[in-house]
Amino acid sequence: MKNATANRRLTLLVMRDAQHSVKQIHLSKPLLLAVPAAAVLSLSGLVLAIQAHSSQAISNLEQKVTLEQLKNIQLQSSITSREQSIERLQTEIIKLSSQAKDMQLKMQHVDQLEQQLQKFIDKHKISMSTDAPADKASSLSWDASEHVGGEYIAVHENDMLDLARETKDDFQEMQELLKTMESNIPHTLKKAQETQVQIAGNPTVWPTASKVMTSSFGYRTDPFTGKAAFHAGIDIAGDNGGPVYAAGAGKVITAEESGARGRYIVIEHPGGLQTWYMHLSKILVNIGDTVDKRQQIAQLGSTGRSTGPHLHFQVVKQDKPVNPLPYIRSDNSLN
Ligand SMILES: [Zn+2]
């Protein structure tokens, strides 16, 4: 269909069929060259377009990937922060547990002190109930098993830290309470001990083996003169050389021989009372000695102004002799 006729021109013959004439189309060389060039150009345009489209698609994909990565990072940071929260919680819990152990030790200490006090009070309950007003310490009771714990509260993640802090506050409050108890109980114990010393010092023991009273406290007819006279104590008949006991714990302030009293001892008791023991045959203690309740301090005799072996026993309260019987009457320990 194409035919070259000249150097610079090309002629194209277009034949359709027998009824139509042949058409001639003259084309210059440059135009002929331009056609493939245009084709090439349009192809490269297509390639460029495809490239552009691809790069757009890639860019979109990249964006999507970046978004995913961002989400990943966010997720990871949320995981990290959650892990940190858990770590903080664990730290709090460890702290609490160590505080709990500390408190347990303190409670045990308090419990021991309380038991010590209770033992002490139990041991002397009888004498305390008869001799002294009930010590307030006896009403002190503390049961560790009943005072720990508290209600159970279910824990949700975000409340965990708050709860841990609240619990810590509770612990601190309890620790303060324990501190107070720790300082109070030894004080109560000391008071109980002081009371006990005083109780032990109260003259309650019948002072001889014999219980035969020959003269009571108060006004009587004097055995020597036959006239009315005041008798400052009680007389208890007994065997010469028989034991004489300290009616209560105390300190010997007099141990000597003197006229009408004969050999005699005076004991001063912690509560302020004094007991006097007269007409002794032998003194077994010295001035300044500390004696226990029921300790033998002398032997019964008849020294001084006496008609026969007996013990003159006297209780002195604030420098005045008082009837000894209310103090020693209930004592049956020597029966
Ligand atoms: Zn007498």
Image: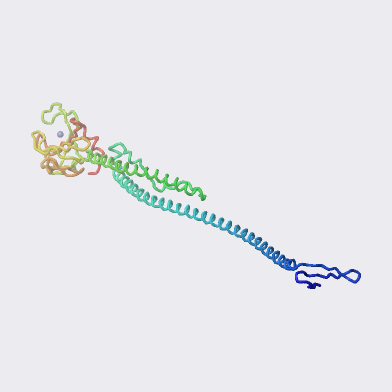
Which image quarter is the C terminus in? Answer: top left
In this view, the residue in front, 322 or 3, is 3
Question: In this rendering, is residue 332 above or below 72?
Answer: above
Q: Is residue 28 above or below residue 192?
A: below
Residue 174 image point, x, y percent: 39, 44
Q: From this viewpoint, which residue is outermost toward the front?
A: 7
Using the image as rendered, state which of residue 198 and residue 100 is in the foreground.
100
**Which quarter of the rendered picture does the N terminus lie within?**
bottom right
Q: Is residue 78 left or right of residue 284?
A: right
Q: Quadrant of residue 135?
A: top left
Where in the figure is residue 220, as x and y percent of width and height?
A: 17, 29
Looking at the rendered structure, the number of numbered marks drawn on it comes to: 0
Q: Residue at the location (61% across, 59% down)?
A: 59
Question: Is residue 230 in view from this perspective?
Answer: yes
Residue 335 shows in the view: no
- Corner quadrant of residue 289: top left
Q: Residue furthest top?
A: 228
Q: Residue 330 vs residue 214: left or right? A: right
Question: Residue 142, percent across and down?
Answer: 37, 44
Give how far across and how far down residue 104 sits, in percent: 37, 50
Q: Is residue 270 left or right of residue 150?
A: left
Residue at far right of view = 19
- The image shows residue 74, relative to residue 47, as above or below, that is above
Colour scheme used in the picture? Answer: rainbow
Ligand 1 is located in which of the four quadrants? top left
